[in-house]
Image (cartoon, rainbow, N blue to C red):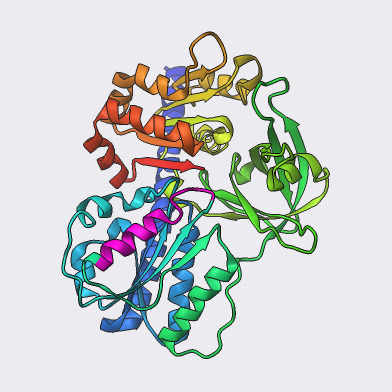
Amino acid sequence: MTADLFRWVGAGVAVLLWLGLIALTVWRVRAAARRAAEQARAFAEAAGDEAVLIAFASQTGFGEELAWMTARALGDGGVGARILPFAELDLETLKRARRLLVVASTTGEGDAPDGAARFVRQAMGTEADLSHLSYGLLALGDRSYDAFCGFGRAVGDWLDRCGAQTLFDRVEVDNGDAGAVRHWQHQLNLITGATAAPDWTPPAYDRWRLVKRTLLNAGSPGGEAWHLAFEPIDHAPDWAAGDIAEVGLPARDGEQPGSREYSVASLPSDGRLELCIRLMTRPDGTPGLASGWLTQEAQIGQEVALRVRANRSFHAPPPEVPIILIGNGTGIAGLRGHLKARARHDKTGGGWLLFGERTRAHDAFYDEELRAWRASGVLTRLDRAFSRDGGEHRYVQALVAEHARTVADWVDRGAWIYVCGSLEGMSKGVHAALEAALGEDRLLGLTEAGRYRRDVY
């Protein structure tokens, strides 16, 4: 009896601890949402009925960051603002507004960020009368894609068709170009009447030190993939699974080449920030500017300018919610962060990783770690496809199609889907396979509910 009693007490304590961890996670997620909502309400209340509506569509967090900077700039100039993500924007809100500023990111070849899917479907398919509305548009994009600023341009074209009047010409930003952002600031100064305002600058980089660099796929028929680790210098960073590391590149020939973004593959509890980076090559065969420096030139022990930016559109659900993680190549980084977060909980809703690379012999990234998570139950399922092993090339989207019924079963019991990796090929193929497995309307519903999230590049 005594032994049984101890076992029952021990089991009870374990359950209470597990429930406590779930409650803490849910509280943190809800607290972050409350803080954002309270800040937005504070802006709106200070502005009154004449508030400028600022609507943002952001995939990686940069657009949201610029939207808040826009609101603060208006506030500093005595003009109130109300901020809404596209996920909460609707026609009725636009019909009540008088002035609108749009910050619209484009993902891939002209696509809208996932959070804007509902607005695109419900609002942009109609042509409402918005002739009372004046608007300004900041479109974010990357000229390496044919459909540069495609979503931002689509929003502007739709507003024009609805009769809205432009406050000023559209401002288009190529890959975070500081000059274009300063031009947007100038247009805001015209709204506020400010004659002098400090230039916006990105939040200061933190100091980090490169402490480890390991080639993950020696002998692979594909490009080199490297694991890098950085330790903080004189600061205690905090971030969540799904966040993004922005690395500031050193000046070359007197020019500042800017920064590059990478999915974070570790947690603060690891004591260091880890990345998985593919060495890119230019058409002439020389190493890519950022990947070449990080994987070939930077020395172990060298100081690196880096900051972590919140990417709420790729954050995790509470641990009791099942998750399906899908990716390829160095996209394993963002998925690994989520698995590390799950590994901290004794009980979760289950996790399923579907991953694709070239060869099992050379490209089974983090294989030992994944197998350990499968054995411990952090991963309920682990399915991998290696396209160069055997005859017909088989990619990760083939796994989704092959297990379509099981994918639907997981979604039926509440699973969220996360996709991380290459935009071309993988993400489009996976999207098509998910549409076939779940139906187009259901997949759109998952997107609008925040249960289908992507970090693709």
Overall secondary structure of the magenta stretch? helix
Label total for image: 0
Residue 172 left/right relative to 57: right
Determine the image quadrant of residue 405.
Answer: top left
Q: Residue at x 38, y 23 (%)?
A: 400
**What residue span does the magenta drawing correspond to?**
144-160
Q: Residue at x 71, y 47 (%)?
A: 289
| Residue 320 at least partly seen | no
Vertical placement of 175 versus 399: above or below? below
Name the spot of residue 235 as percent of width and height, x first.
70, 58
Q: Residue at x 51, y 36 (%)?
A: 422
**Picture coordinates of residue 119, whole percent (x, y):** 26, 55
Residue 139 picture quarter: bottom left
Task: Please state if 403 lies on the left or on the right of 346 as rendered.
Answer: left
State the residue lying farthest toward the front.
284
* Of residues 280 and 204, the one drawn nearer to the viewer in this rendering: 280
Would you place residue 436 above or below residue 100 in this image? above
x, y (%) of residue 430?
40, 30
- For the residue pair 59 and 163, the one nearer the viewer reads as 163
Q: Say left or right for 398 vs 436.
A: right
- The question of residue 393 being in magenta is answered with no
Residues 193 and 169: in front is 169
Task: Locate the N terminus by quadrant.
Answer: top left
Is 154 situated left or right of 397 in this image?
left
Asked whether residue 151 is drawn in magenta, I would say yes
Residue farthest to the top, as pictured: 390
Residue 258 appears in view: yes
Residue 17's spot in the image, x, y percent?
Answer: 45, 37
Residue 168 higher or lower than 304, as above or below? below
Q: Is residue 395 above or below residue 151?
A: above
